[in-house]
Image: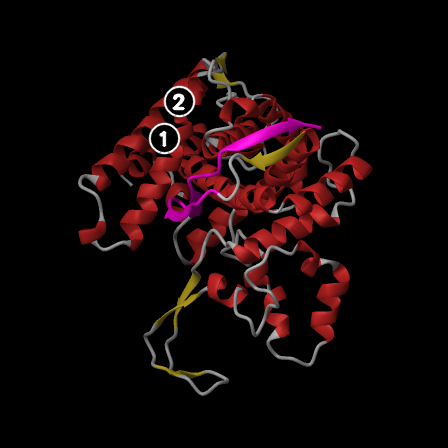
Amino acid sequence: EQKRKEAGTKYTRGIAAQGELWRETRDIIGPGLMTDAALSYLGLITDAAAAAVDVVDLYKDNLGKWTKAAAYDMFTSVALGDNPKSTDPESTHQLAELVETGDDALSLSVLLSTYPKEMQPPNAYEDMVEKYETIFRVTRSYLESRKHDGEVNLPDCWFKDLKMVQGLDMEEIILLMPAFLAAGIGTTEGVTNWILLNLINNPEKQEKLYEELKSELNGQPFRKSAELPYLKACIRESHRLNPPGPAMTMRTHEKDVVTESGYEIPAGTLMWFCPYQVNRDPRYVEDADKYIPERFFKDAVKKRKESQCPHSKALDHGLSKHPFSMGARGCLGRRAAELEIQSLLVELFSRYRVEADPPNQPYKHKQNTLVIPDPMPKVKLIPR
């Protein structure tokens, strides 16, 4: 907030604001990533995904570290048109050092805003500030190094569009970078990790996915026009089974509410939507604890929509369907994140069969930016 006031900027505050400032901020920042305009960055994303899979064999014992770095590389490629290749341990790119910093910064932000003080680690606030300061410093240094004749010279990318098309000052973009960077890593990482875990633990589903990728793409990168219903079903089923945001969409009602079942909710009660519970409720989902992507094929969705059962349609409600939420308060980078996740999955499973080594490795649910499986399984990568 102090930096924002000193620089005379406003959109850094507008992301989490209310009213007109929030609407103006979304109108300025959103178009490049919230609409199909995000497709203009697909080449940057697929190149970064391919580079990440080139070195995935170095992470057989730490797949979670790889997905975090891959998410960072894809986001940075979109934002700055420059891939730091942080998945490569030999990378000397100056932005590579931010891969852990950005994720840690947002994880601490989430912790500080949702957990009582008694549950927070010592110096959590000071650690968060230090990490955001590091992001400011490294980002500013990087952009200064790209200056030519007093102007920052960027290739075609989101930040260039924010400056040239949307008219943002470069100082505003620098101050926005921590929020973009932190949100762009942990969210994509969390969603991707659950998809990988489910496909690793269900090899017959992974094989079906490979056959679809081979038939439709034949080793080529992901493209939006490709017919990939099984890939989409795998992603959707993973989100049903393991939503990385198990509780979301807070709302406080100003009036007393009585639900259809007769449950009374007094005015002033803070309400959360809990997709984890809803999506595993046997009233809504058959074999709710099993990973079955086929339940999201078009015919299955149509059957639920035509059903007279009031519960069956809940599975396909938008709040259950989208890992990045929906509506006006949905994730700013949703479209880009979806492209990143699909591109990375296409690259990985087109090139490798991924097996847990050994099988049936235990894991726990860990709260970071989102809930992630910890640890990710150690794997064997078998070239296709």
The amino acid type, in three-letter code, at marker 1 is Thr
Q: Mark 1, residues whose alpha carbon is within 10 Å: few (<14), some, or many (≥20)?
A: many
Q: Is residue 269 left or right of residue 120?
A: right
Do residues under tags 2 and 1 come within 8 Å of each other at their CB atoms? yes
Residue 336 inside the magenta-drawn segment: no
Image position of 269 with respect to 380: above or below: below
Tell me the SS state at disc 1: helix
Q: CA distance from mark 2 to mark 1?
A: 7 Å
Q: Secondary structure at mark 2?
A: helix
* Residue at image location 23% in from the left, 41% down from the top: 125
Q: Which residue is mark 1?
A: 101
Instruction: Sort mark 2 into few (<14), some (14-19) or many (20+) by Cα contacts within 10 Å.
Output: some
Q: Which residue is mark 2?
A: 97
Give the residue displayed 39% in from the left and 74% down from the top: 253
Q: Position of residue 231 (x, y in %)?
A: 69, 46
The residues colored magenta run 361-384
Camera sees residue 78: no
> Residue 26: x and y, percent?
50, 49
Closer-to-camera residue (354/372): 354
- Farthest residue toward the bottom? 262
Residue at x 72% of width, y 49% of height = 230
Q: Can you name the residue that lies furthest to the right here?
A: 215
In-image side of 278 versus 112 (left or right) = right
Work out whether residue 128 or residue 198 is closer to the camera in this orientation and state it: 198
